[in-house]
Image (tube, rainbow, N blue to C red):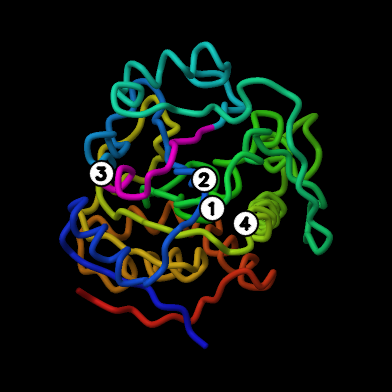
């Protein structure tokens, strides 16, 4: 049975809420709202003003975790300062889930590369989740979307290094590429299993740069804005975004795809589908 992915070319909070309602689900209990807070200096991340109506609709709490690389978000103190400078704390009470240790450990018995996922310990406080992703390129993963948010995004600072290193944190920037991508899929699977699939995914295809929101110095967008997608399936929503890019006639497409393909980015989706927590087969429902 193929997954449903709702799509609209209209990039507004109101349209996202409309597509969310078409899912026919209600996230219950304490809802975690996972998004990307943006590295200082980055010009492309999706701003809090855009997300506010969607977050208010869920009644959830914004969650983030510290990074594993030097920058404006690798310590709790610096990350809180960045959250303030980027306007997140003006609108939301943000939970830095790994702000204080120890980490929470999720088992991955069927993991391709890693058998454990180290996440922010405050994940235990939530019953369901909405993942708000900015679809764009990524210097290491090729692209960033729902699967990256589930894995690197929810991992603690230590856990990010553990995923990047496919279980070896001693030299995690020099891991074999497919091992890193498969580790991301492994980590994402553990979060999906933890929430028993009570997760909604939103991908916004705007400000489409080859670089991630984690880059303090990022290229400007190379493609025109495309639209928004909403689904209950993280694999399907990322696959749909990639298919939409491939079908595009945008003159910036070759540059974007060079980033994705040179990093073998589609392998993250392949590995995630093999792990069984989503499907590459989907029905795209345009609204």
Q: Is residue 237 above or below residue 173?
A: below
Secondary element under disc 1, as helix, strand or loop, is strand
State the separation of the CA atoms marked 1 and 2.
6 Å
Q: Which residue is mark 4?
A: 195
Q: Which residue occupies the foreground of this view, 84 or 222?
A: 84
Q: Earlier in the sequence, mark 1 or mark 4?
A: 1
Name the side, left or right, on which 251 lies relative to 280.
left
Q: Tags 1 and 2 in contact by the CB under 8 Å rule?
A: yes
Q: Is residue 280 above or below residue 166?
A: below
Q: Which residue is mark 1?
A: 128
Q: Position of residue 124 (x, y in %)?
A: 66, 41
Extent of the magenta region: 53-64
Residue at image point 70% right, 43% down = 163
Q: Is residue 111 above or below residue 180?
A: below
Q: Which residue is mark 3?
A: 221
Q: Which residue is mark 2?
A: 30
Q: Earlier in the sequence, mark 3 or mark 4?
A: 4
């Amino acid at each position: 049975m193929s997954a449903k992915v709702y799509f609209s070319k209209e990039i507004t909070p109101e349209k996202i809420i409309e597509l969310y309602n078409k899912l026919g689900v209600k996230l219950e209990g304490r809802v975690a709202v996972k998004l990307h807070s943006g590295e200082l200096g980055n010009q492309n991340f999706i701003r809090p003003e855009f997300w506010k109506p969607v977050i208010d609709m869920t009644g959830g709490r914004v969650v983030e975790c510290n990074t594993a690389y030097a920058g404006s978000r690798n310590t709790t103190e610096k990350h809180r300062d960045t959250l303030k400078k980027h306007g997140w704390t003006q609108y939301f009470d943000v939970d830095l889930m790994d702000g204080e240790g120890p980490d929470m450990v999720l088992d991955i018995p069927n993991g391709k590369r890693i058998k454990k996922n180290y996440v922010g310990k405050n994940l235990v406080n939530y019953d369901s989740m909405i993942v708000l992703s900015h679809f764009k390129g990524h210097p290491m993963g090729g692209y960033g979307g729902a699967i990256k948010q589930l894995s690197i995004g929810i991992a603690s600072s230590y856990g990010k290094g553990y995923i990047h290193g496919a279980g070896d944190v001693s030299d995690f920037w020099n891991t074999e590429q497919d091992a890193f991508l498969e580790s991301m899929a492994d980590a994402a699977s553990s979060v999906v299993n933890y929430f028993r699939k009570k997760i909604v995914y939103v991908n916004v295809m705007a400000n489409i740069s080859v670089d991630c929101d984690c880059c303090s110095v990022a290229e400007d967008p190379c493609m025109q804005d495309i639209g928004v997608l909403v689904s209950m399936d993280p694999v399907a929503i990322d696959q749909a975004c990639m298919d939409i890019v491939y079908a595009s006639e945008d003159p910036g497409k070759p540059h974007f795809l060079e980033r994705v393909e040179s990093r073998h980015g589609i392998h993250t989706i392949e590995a995630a589908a093999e792990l069984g927590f989503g499907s590459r087969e989907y029905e795209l429902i345009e609204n």
